[in-house]
Amino acid sequence: MKPNFSLRLRVFNLNCWGLPYVSKHRSDRMKRLGDFLNMESFDLALLEEVWSEQDFQCLKEKLSFTYPAAHYFRSGIIGSGLCVFSKHPIQEIIQHVYTLNGYPYMIHHGDWFCGKAVGLLVFHLSGLVLNAYVTHLHAEYSRQKDIYLAHRVAQAWELAQFIHHTSKKADVVLLCGDLNMHPKDLGCCLLREWTGLHDAYLETQDFKGFEEGYTMVPENHYVSQKDLEPFPCGIRIDYVLYKAVSGFCISCKSLKSTAGHGPYNGTPLSDHEALMATLCVRYSPLQQNPSFTYGPAGRLPLISVLREAWTELGLGIAQARWWAAFAGNVIGVGLLLLVLLCFLVAEERAREVAILLWTPNVGLVLGAGAVYLFHTQEARGLCRVQTELQHVLGREREAQDLSSEPQLALLLGQERGQN
């Protein structure tokens, strides 16, 4: 690598709000999005909530000259909604679907049917290996009573682990997406502390957009004003995160967001604001990877957030087990009723009533069985994540104790020298 090596990356990220039959003016917004991407010619355009594969194919055809490489990540019943358009050839593609993703009986929320996931694309740019990740985590429907918090924390940990284990050969790591978490939320802190990713909004010296980097604002007429009632100024849930490993350094030269309307003061492209970042990568052989330079004090934030996540998952496990036990009791009562109904039919006592009650009782047992199986699986999934957190927490505490010993010995030596 040449000492004067530098690389500029222009990145675009947007949650497109592209749900067929539900999202307003979807086709027109997708068309204008394609026109804008062609005009700006970013290096990478990472999109979420492109739920219709037909929309992706239309964008792919429209952008084929400017962005010859494209990929759509398929999962779930509806789809992950994730896709990427690139000026550069894609070397590798990997996808990971999150283990936990809401509840199938919460049909009006729909997250379970989407198959939320994280997609990874590997690029080779002038000898540099770039891992670009795009993701969309479970939505938060109520800040006061968030029944999906444990799922979102588990997803954040799976995402952090996926990045941690797939980026070992990468020179630069880029993560874009709708995390559905505020900057100080538990899952967001867990993700950043474990991966060492930097937030473009916090790092850049040149930001143009709403205060605090909000990406859902009341000025956007597609946004549900009811959802933003607790946050009258807006919320920031869309991110551009990045880091470089030893031998390179990366900085965000500029970050810009749309301002409640389209890029050229037209109708908004989505109910979310788009993020446009300019990143600069430079060769820096003396640059160290922060993940290997933790001292005792540096490990404290990680230990604290790991402990908090472990506790939150414990609450989720208890709730899942309660629902599984409740469903198990319903199954037991339902089976007893079935035996009773069989007895009544055999004895020809109240035969008509027994036959009438047979079908709804079978439906009750089958429904309760489905709930039992789902929440049993949920509890085991949360237990798996909690076990991983427990292991990492133990290792971090051991490392903190070991790194504290030399400093303690140094302090004791200084005290003896003074005496």
Image (tube, grey):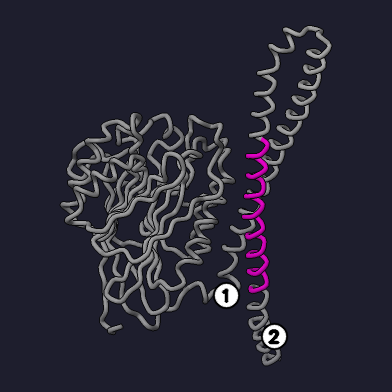
Mark 2 — residue?
Answer: 412
Expressed as whole percent of the image width and height from the top left, the position of residue 180 reads 45, 45
Contact between marks 2 and 1 (CB within 8 A): the answer is: no
Q: Is residue 359 left or right of residue 87?
A: right
Mark 1 — residue?
Answer: 295
Q: Nearer the viewer, residue 128 or 75?
A: 75
Q: Nearer the viewer, residue 31 or 210?
A: 31
Q: In the displayed structure, would residue 290 be above or below residue 347?
A: below
Taking the spot 56% from the left edge, 31% from the top edge, the residue there is 105
Q: Residues within 10 Å of mark 1 (few under 14, many from 20)?
A: some
Q: In the displayed structure, would residue 302 be above or below residue 275?
A: below
Task: Identify the mark nearer the N-term, 2 or 1.
Answer: 1
Examine the image and state in which quarter residue 370 appears.
top right
Q: Nearer the viewer, residue 221 or 372?
A: 372
Q: In the displayed structure, would residue 260 be above or below residue 192?
A: above
Q: Which residues are magenta?
A: 372-399
Q: Nearer the viewer, residue 180 or 99?
A: 99
Q: Is residue 120 left or right of residue 305?
A: left
Residue type at mark 1? Gly
In what quadrant of the picture does the C terminus appear? bottom right
Expressed as whole percent of the image width and height from the top left, the position of residue 63 reads 20, 51
Taking the spot 67% from the left edge, 58% from the top edge, the residue there is 387
Examine the image and state in which quarter residue 393 appears.
bottom right
Q: Is residue 160 left or right of residue 331?
A: left
Expressed as whole percent of the image width and height from the top left, the position of residue 170 reads 40, 71
Query: In this rendering, does residue 202 appear at all?
Result: no
Residue type at mark 2? Leu
Q: Is residue 261 left or right of residue 334?
A: left
Q: Secondary structure at mark 1?
A: loop
Query: In this rendering, does residue 171 appear at all?
Result: yes
